[in-house]
Image: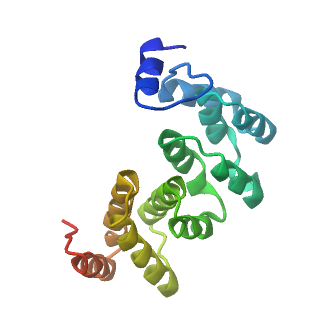
Amino acid sequence: MMDGSVAKSMRDKGLAYKLNWGATLPRLREMADEMGKDYDLAIALWKEDVRECKILATLMMPAEHMLPEVCDIWMEQMPSQELAEQTSFNLWQYLPYAPEKAYQWIASDKEYYQLCGFHVLTRLFMNRQEPNERGINEYLDQALSALQGPYLSVRKAAMQSLVRFSELGLLYERMAKSALKSISLELF
């Protein structure tokens, strides 16, 4: 399963894990599917400073059993952009409390927290989950702030979430366009 050239490429790009086998995401998904959901194993895998173990943990953790406190610990230990994205797509979006965490994270000043928050909101919007009025105002304020912020990864995630937000309907599209216009940007 090891791919030395992939692992070397990741190291060259600054992804520093204690151990990185360079395994592909499709192979890791296959392994997780074969093993199934397992809370205890996911916890144990996350504790390892090995790229593949952490990704497997995100795939094997049953979202409905993950406590908010464990979620907070994993966020505090988030080692890279890759893991932030994988965790958002494989696990965070499925948490029963995903919207609450996403709004907390986008209000953070930490890059990976913001990145996870916007990725989760993108997925929720894609699944037609509409925010309430307070959520809309908070979301738009944080998205505009992120778009003017220092982190390229967060700016991209915020813009993608705005695209998905605008797809919730004409009213949402108008709100997104108006918000973006206020900072001299356009949605499409």
Residue sitting farthest toward the bottom: 133
Q: Nearer the viewer, residue 157 or 35?
A: 157
Q: Quadrant of residue 154?
A: bottom left
List x then y, in percent, for residue 26.
49, 28
Residue at (66, 46) in percent of width and height: 77
Please tell me whether residue 10 is drawn above or below residue 39 in the rendered image: above
Left or right: residue 58 compared with residue 142: right
- Residue found at x 45% / y 32%: 14
Quarter of the figure with residue 122: bottom left
Residue nearest the viewer, comparing 28 with 36: 28
Q: Is residue 86 left or right of residue 142?
A: right
Q: Residue at image x 22%, y 68%?
A: 187
Image height check: is 78 above or below 185? above
Kindly identify the residue that appears in the image at 43 percent across and 66 percent down: 125
Number of marks in the rendered image: 0
* In the foreground, 46 or 66: 46
Q: Position of residue 160 (x, y in %)?
A: 34, 59
**Residue 13 vs residue 125, the one in the foreground:** 13
State the quadrant of the C terminus: bottom left
